Structure formats: structure tokens, C-alpha cells
Image (tube, rainbow, N blue to C red):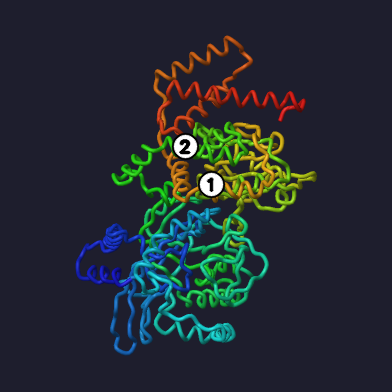
Amino acid sequence: MCFVGGFFFVAQNVPNSDWEKKVTEFFKEKLKENNATNWVPSLNDVPVHYLKPNSLVKFRCMVQDMFDPEFYMGVYETVDPNTNARVLHFGKYRDVAECGPQQEIDLNSSQTVTSERQTFYCVPVPGESAWSVIVLNAPFQAYISASQARVSPSTSYTPSRHKRSYEEDEDMDLHPSKQKEQHMGNSCYWGIVVMTFFQSSGGDIHGCVEPKRLETEAPAGHHLVSPNCSPPLDLNFPLPGEKGPACLVKVYESWESYKVNDVLEVYGVLSVDPVLSIVNNEERDSSALDPMECMDTAEEQRVHSPPASLVPRIHVILAQKLQHINPLLPACLNDEESKTFVSNFMSELSPVRAELLGFLTHALLGDSLAAEYLILHLISTVYARRDVLPLGKFTVNLSGCPRNSIFTEHIYHIIQQLVPASFRLQMSINNMNHWRFIPHKDYTANRLVSGLLQLASNTSLVIDETQLEQGQLDTAGVHNVTALGNLITWQKVDYDFNYHRMEFPCNINVLITSEGRSLLPSDCQVHLQPQIIPPNMEEYMSSLLTAVLPSVLNKFRIYLSLLKLLDYSISDEVTKAVEEDFVEMRKNDPESITADDLHKTLLVARFLSLSAGQTTLSRERWLRAKQLEALRKARLQQQKCVNGNEL
């Protein structure tokens, strides 16, 4: 904050200095120097209590909700009642105003400048793979090791402010006035903090959890208890068992360019001042006595102003919307350095594809056709929308999976090791009836309550239908099945705002594993034909991952993420050849191929070309796509003849 203060000090003496823009430019340039981003501590990795307040931190997150905009004092003036001395302060990147013990904020000063900022409620990327988190934080850990010292909390795990002992914590809980005395001395309550404009957010409250010693990770439930042991605080993670910090991210410019479910990497000033919790508690107490004091409900105040120790604030200096979330790839592929990286990797694409195909063939018990389609599925992505139709989605139904077997669980674990974010949905009657799939608006807390289908773009969702048993779906279960169908067919989730539903487009890779044909829609059904039956499935599947070198595994990860980002086109010449081929096939057997079959074959040809590093469709790839489709259909027909009904 001293750098920011310096720019502000200069601005007081230099007219039109545009100090706020210079702050952003300063940090943008500094972060480019000598891999400076490596030593900026990440809230995804470093526990909050090890970080120094008002230090520079970064956070990779998904925007779960957008709260109402708020007014704050961008510039304010303090006055000493004894000497009448006046000092001008900047309020940007702060929650609490700075003033000495003998100073007061002059709310009527002509120097006061009221500004506006937007608050996002952000959570770690739902379902982010463990390998992705490790790779993401490796540069910072390497920096700490190289420094051979636990320097300041802004760059290491050594706190400059010592943590209180357990006994001191107990004393603070029993005597909150002591905590107030400690922190009120050097700071004043922000006189004008929040003024809301429009509705936007929501919340959900459940059971009680031990509040002590919050680390970066929340307990495996969603719920934490605030220090005054009031009702539990739901951190609103979309997926069950998620860990990590939730943050209030305060954005000062261009906030209209961000939307719910965007994945961001933000650099900003950490605000965890305990006085925030004290002020918020006092506000709730006073508003309970005087309902006219504040129009917000007590629940809304509690959700929107949680204790900073549980939900820290980040005042954003720089923010970037991420094109992808694979830390092995450059964040932006447009600069020269990134283009060189892509070019070098593309030159060795063929052996990587061959190794990946062999690896997945072994994982699918020797079925090379299923492995081919799994690769095509994993590199698929919605590249455009034509009216309501999402183009590029490729949901695969892998049927023929053993029922109640550990096979589907291990297939998911393998996918989890290949993609940056994923989730396995066990489609049991109990889960379908009791889990919350669709996010909904809680108007009491003015908050968007998350659901399982609030996921970041390009998340792999594996639906395990082999878990489905006999039973009856209740109303909630039927709604959840409908939501899954809409996600697969239209790549959208209809969020529930009580009085209406709002469509949120998404881009989720859905793989359905089932015994027979899935109850859910899909773009392509591939029936598994195992060529080997391992005597010990657990041992066989576990040995697959241990046999792959980490360097090879990383190449698989880069391969699958990079090919999603490539452009693709079909030349006029090839388009004409495909049309003629389609007409010829229709002449020979009108029932053998439909317009839908043509679309599906073109989709297979698209991903087949991209999987080989080709960004245009060639005659060779078109013929290979037709061959794969013929083999897939023949297998389904064979299975139908064997069982007497369609699978």
C-alpha cells in the first residue's frame, strides 16, 4: 500500500496526474519483470493467517455471485480536534479508513470524493484437479525454497504478526471488547461504506462447525461458524466436499466485462482487518434495535459482510479473465513467446496422440475404438452458438460398463488426472432426490445459492449411471434429471429466480457411463467391448497411472487443453466433396444416413482433424471419420441383435 500512497501523495501536488491509472500500470509492469508473478503469494495455496494485511496477493477463482455495487470514499479528510490539523487520505483498495487516535473523519469536508466499486463473491474453481493446483503453486514454492528463508508474510509462510495462542483466542471470544480495543486504535470505521443499487445475490444456511483456526482450506462441508458463534456461515461452494477460501473480490474498473461463472486471476490488496467483523456485528445489533437504520435484512448483512478471517477481501489492482485453467499452458496464447510454445508442442503432436491413445485403450480394457472416441470427447468444446443450438458439444455415452463395479470410478480417476477440472456425479436415486443441481436466488439473503451445475467452462462432468438402482424420483429428482438433459442438449442451465428462470449458457464436457443405453440424451453412444478381463480390476487400473512418467502425463494434459483452443475451418473444395459424398450415400441406401448422421460425422471429422493437429478438414480425415462411425454403428447393431433390444 505504500506504493499506492506514494502515487496519491504526488497526485495532491500535480494537477491531472491520473494517479489511479499509474498504480495499475506500475503493478502491471512490475509483474512482468523476472517472473515476479511467481513470488506473489496465492490465496489458493497460502493460509490467510500467514499473510500480512494490505499486502499484494493473487487468487484464481470463479465468480460465484455478484453483489450490489457499493459507494466508498475514494478520498477523505481527517481532522485533529485539538490542533485542527487536516490530512487528506485515499480510500481506494481499503475497507477501513486510516486515522490516528486523535483524528476524526470529516464527513462534511469539501475534499471528500465518493466513488463506486463492484463486489464479486468468488470461490476456487469447482472441481479443480489436485495436479492443477500443485502445478499452479509450484513456482511460488520454488521461490520460497530458493530464498532459504521465511521472509515476510507476503512472500512466505512466516507471519509477522504472531498467531494468538488458544487461550488468547478463548479470551478474545469471551471478551470481544479487548479485540475491539486492539484494532480500533489505528483505524476508524469507514463512514460511508455501502449503498446498494440493484438486487443480485443469495445464501443457504445449515449445521454448526468448529470455528477455530481457519486455514486456507475450509472443512469438507460448506459451512463455517463466525467468531461470535452465531448461525453457521455457508461458503456457497457449488460442489460437495470442496476446500479452499471464498473471497469478496472488489473490482474498481471494467466490472461490466465480467459475468457469473467467469474464471479470473486477480492481483490485489488483501484486506483481513478484524475490525470489519466488529463493525459488522455492531451494525447487525444496532439494526435489530432500529429497523429504520438499515433496509438490509440481518441475514443479508451476515452473508454480504462475513468475518474477514473466514472470507477475506481482495481489492483488485489487476484482473484477467482466463481463456483456460491449465497451468501447464501459457495464460494467453497470442504473444510471441506463447506462439513459440504452441509451435514446438505441435511439432511433436503425433507421438503424444499415439501414446495417449495407447494409454486410454489400456484404461478401457483394450477397446481402441472407445479410446478414439474418448479422445474426441475430451478435446471437444462449444465453439459457437447458432440461435439456441450449441455447436461443438460432443456428449459421449459409454455403454456396456460393468454394473456396481470399480471400473467407472477408475475411469473417472484417469480423466481427473488428464483435465484441469472435473466432477463425478453418481446418479443414484438418493443423490438425484437430495442434491441441489440448479442455483437459485435467496431473496432473504439477497444471494445466489450455488448448485452442482454451476461449473466453470470446459469442466469435465462424468455422470455415472451404473449407480442407478430401482426407486422413485421425487419432484426435486425429476427437476434434476431435466436440468441434466438441458445441460447436455442445449449447454445451458436455467437458474431459478423464484418468479422466473434465467438461462446461463455453459460449456461442459459430459461423459455418461452406463450399463445399457443412457436415460439421458447424448450426441454419441459407444458400446464398450473389453478385449481383456483383468483378474484384479483395482490393481490393473491403479498400475496404469503409476506406469506413466510425470513428463508424459503433462504432455497428455497440454495436448487435451491446447487442442480445445485451436481454430478450425473447412475449405469450399472439401465442403463440396462432402456434399457429393452425402448425396451418393443417400442414393445407395436412403435409410442408412440422415442429416443428423451427416452432422455427427462432420463433428467427428472436426475433432479427429484437431486431434492430429490439423486445423482444416482433409479428404483423408473425412474418410477416417466415416470409418469410425461405421464401426461404432456396427457395434451397436451387433449388440442390439444379441440382446434383442436397443442399448
Is residue 496 visible in the rendered image? The answer is no
* Circle nearer the N terminus (2, 1): 2
**Seen from this angle, which residue lies furthest front?**
535
Q: Which residue is mark 2?
A: 353
| Amino acid on which the number 1 mark rests in the picture | Thr
Categorize mark 2 by other alpha carbons within 10 Å: few (<14), some (14-19), many (20+): some
Q: How many marks?
A: 2
Question: Which secondary structure lies at badge 1?
Answer: loop
| Amino acid on which the number 2 mark rests in the picture | Arg
Whether residue 423 is situated above or below residue 359 in the rendered picture: below
C-alpha span from label 2 to label 1: 21 Å
Q: Residue at x 51, y 87 (%)?
A: 178
Q: Residue at x 58, y 23 (%)?
A: 597
The foreground one among 89 and 574 is 574
| Residue 49 screen position, x and y as percent | 47, 73
| Residue 556 screen position, x and y as percent | 47, 44
Instruction: Say which of marks 2 and 1 sits in front.
Output: 2
Q: Is residue 315 left or right of residue 389?
A: left
Q: Is residue 592 left or right of residue 133?
A: right
Which image quarter is the C terminus in? top right
The foreground one among 272 and 464 is 464
Question: Which secondary structure lies at badge 2?
Answer: helix
Whether residue 559 is situated above or below residue 137 in the rendered picture: above
Whether residue 478 is situated above or below residue 96 in the rendered picture: above
Q: Which residue is mark 1?
A: 459
Q: Is residue 161 left or right of residue 504?
A: left
Q: Residue at x 41, y 37 (%)?
A: 349
Is residue 239 visible in the rendered image? The answer is yes
| Residue 563 screen position, x and y as percent | 44, 38
**Seen from this angle, which residue lies furthest right?**
471
Categorize mark 1 by other alpha carbons within 10 Å: few (<14), some (14-19), many (20+): many
Which image quarter is the N terminus in? bottom left
